[in-house]
Amino acid sequence: MMEYIRRHMEGRILELSKSYSAILLTGPRQAGKTTMLRELAEKEKIGRQYVTLDDLNERDIAKNDPALFLQLHKPPVLIDEVQYAPELFTYIKIYVDEHHHPGDFWMTGSQIFRLMRGVQESLAGRVALLHMSPLSHREIVGAPCVPFTTDLDRLLAQRDQMQPVSTPELFARLWRGSMPGLVSGQTPDRNVFYSSYLSTYMECDVRDLSGSVDALKFNRFVTAVAARTSQLLNYNALAEEADIDIQTSKAWINILETLGIIFLLHPYSNNVLKRTIKTPKVYFYDTGLVCYLTHWSSPEVAESGAMSGALLENFAVSEIVKSYQNAGLEPYLYFYRDRDAKEIDVILEGDGKLCPLEIKKTATPDQRLTRVFGVIDKSPLQHGTGAVLCMADKFSAFDSDNLIVPIWMI
């Protein structure tokens, strides 16, 4: 049996189980949701039942006789893939309202937005919602869970907690991917893993969400999205490449978001900054899937190839997002681009401040990279500490307002 990789979210789950009767953990398939919850259930030693709605018999009962399902599987219970029976939510609500017992229901689901609707209608205020992505770099190296910040004191406190990672090492991690099955060595062949991931899980889930789907066209579409990671989302270009109409292109992007495969970063704007564009940028939660889809045959080729900058940006942005999700927090991330072609890769908003971040594949960044940060001075929010995220081997700074942060520290 492969060694279990401890997840940052464990403490948050146990903490929420003391006050919420129901916890719903969403995220893409194979991200490790069930493994983590079953591991925690064993440590609880309270005899929590486990049932999966991937089992068609269990799914049938849950859909057609939810009351009987809850009699058969009395709380405390872990219900896996609960999105297959949204009919359960109303009955869980009734049970929760009658018993008020914290930690009774742990649930997982692989279809985020479809689930949210059922949850909001039936379990509003009664369920704690968390999202789990594939492994973060910090989880892989066993570093503590710290939401990314440009706060100097917090970064100074962290810099000695992690080992520096060279550019080739980082690209090896980025290329291999962050799915627990790959990282733990449970599935040693990366190509076999991603090939079956696409054909087994994604095609099946896409059909479930959209009815009939042309698997060949959908595969072309996902590949086209991967080739444009870290770029502005262009529905027309994607539709053209996959030979579909623009409505289908928009629907399929929504499906990829729903399945937790991609996320969109929206542009920062307010009434003062009127020249900003409105189009979001697209990123994948797992850079290994991007490398597989775009046929980079090795980490070395990915590092020297035309997409190396985009891959590194995707890795950095997804790591920032994971650092917040793993702490059970909502990340407030944006980017900036205006019609004068001024651009900031990421803007991190928090505590009334905007912290601009530039991401560069260099070990020796130039301070001129920070000049563009001045565009956010017109914002009503305070201009916070900025940073260049790069391949430097140690944490340093240009000055007190602009830091140099190695990407391995995220």
Image (cartoon, rainbow, N blue to C red):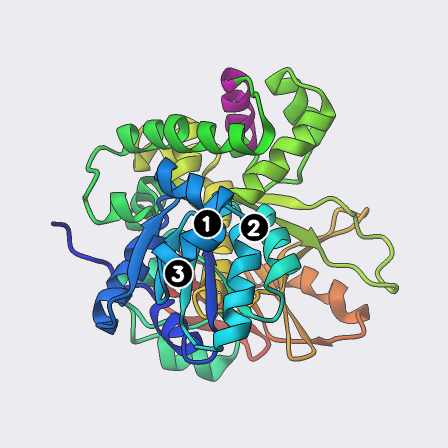
Which corner quadrant holds the C terminus? bottom left
* Distance of label 2 from label 3 (alpha carbons): 41 Å
Picture residue at 58% right of the left edge, 25% below the top: 211
Asked whether the beta carbons under mark 2 and mark 3 sit within 8 Å of each other, the answer is no
Q: Amino acid at mark 1?
A: Val
Asked whether the beta carbons under mark 3 and mark 1 sit within 8 Å of each other, the answer is no
Is 156 inside the magenta-drawn segment?
A: no
> Mark number for residue 82?
1
Residue 155 sits above or below residue 405 on the image: below
Disc 3 target residue: 392
Picture residue at 46% right of the left edge, 42% below the top: 311
- Comes first in the chain, label 2 or label 1: 1
Residue 278 in the image: x percent, y percent?
Answer: 78, 47
| Magenta segment boundaries in residue numbering | 215-225
> Mark number for residue 115?
2
Q: Amino acid at mark 2?
A: Leu
* Distance of label 2 from label 1 (alpha carbons): 8 Å
